[in-house]
Amino acid sequence: MRMDIRLTRIDDRLIHGQLATAWSKATGIERILVVSDEAAHDELRKFLLKQATPPSIKSHVITKQKLIDIDQSGLFDGTKIMLLFASPQDVLEVVLAGVHLKSVNIGGMRFSEGKKMVTNFISLDNEDVQAFVKLANLGIELEIRQVPADRKTDLMQLIKKEKLLHE
């Protein structure tokens, strides 16, 4: 038995209102694990992220290594979990270390220098694209939806359409 991962999401805002309400209700989760080395080492950010969590749900802000350890230890086996990441590189790192994921929801990746906007809420650079390609090659579904009611959009189809693959 493993963690019952109901949603793995990349959103550089991590926990926020939309996520806390819509996604936690739709997935029926018991815990949110924010997986971010930066946030895990920032006490103020940890406190603020926990404050944004709905009262009925437990949340933890942990490092990537801690997630790998938890996954291997069986500590949360059977627990309905939402994993939140800030980047596809972080997701790829834990997957390569043995954390089993079937699907990743891409919620929000803000625009910054060197990134190309592919939707009004997702911007990618070459490193992001390469990480997503590796995840897709491992058989992981990469779907875009801001809220559960949205229709799924296949990120890899969008990457191909935007000609972001440098083969």
Image (cartoon, grey):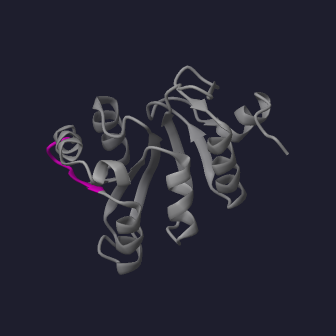
Q: Which residue is drawn at 61% across and 33% down?
A: 124
Residue 3 in picture, x, y percent from top left: 38, 67
- Quarter of image, res 144: top right
- 167, above or below 70, in the image: above
Q: At 68% across and 59% down in the image, what residue appears? A: 139
Estimate the x, y position of residue 142 in percent, counting from the top left.
Answer: 61, 46
Q: Position of residue 154 (x, y in %)?
A: 66, 38
Expressed as whole percent of the image width and height from the top left, the position of residue 105 reads: 52, 43
Q: Which residue lies furthest to the top in this view?
A: 120
Q: Tell which of 35 and 99 is nearer to you.
A: 35
Residue 52 lies in quadrant = top left
- Counting the numbered discs, the total is 0
Residue extending farthest to the right is 167
The one of 8 and 121 positioned closer to us in this rendering: 121
Is residue 29 shown in magenta? no
Q: In this view, does 17 lie above or below 51?
A: above
Would residue 100 be seen by someone viewing this image from the given angle? yes
Q: Residue at x 65, y 38 (%)?
A: 155
- Determine the residue positioned at 37% across, 41% down: 26
Q: Is residue 35 visible?
A: no
Horizontal side, residue 165 vs residue 40: left or right: right
Q: Which residues are the magenta region?
A: 54-61
Q: Quadrant of the C terminus?
A: top right
147 relative position to 118: left or right: left
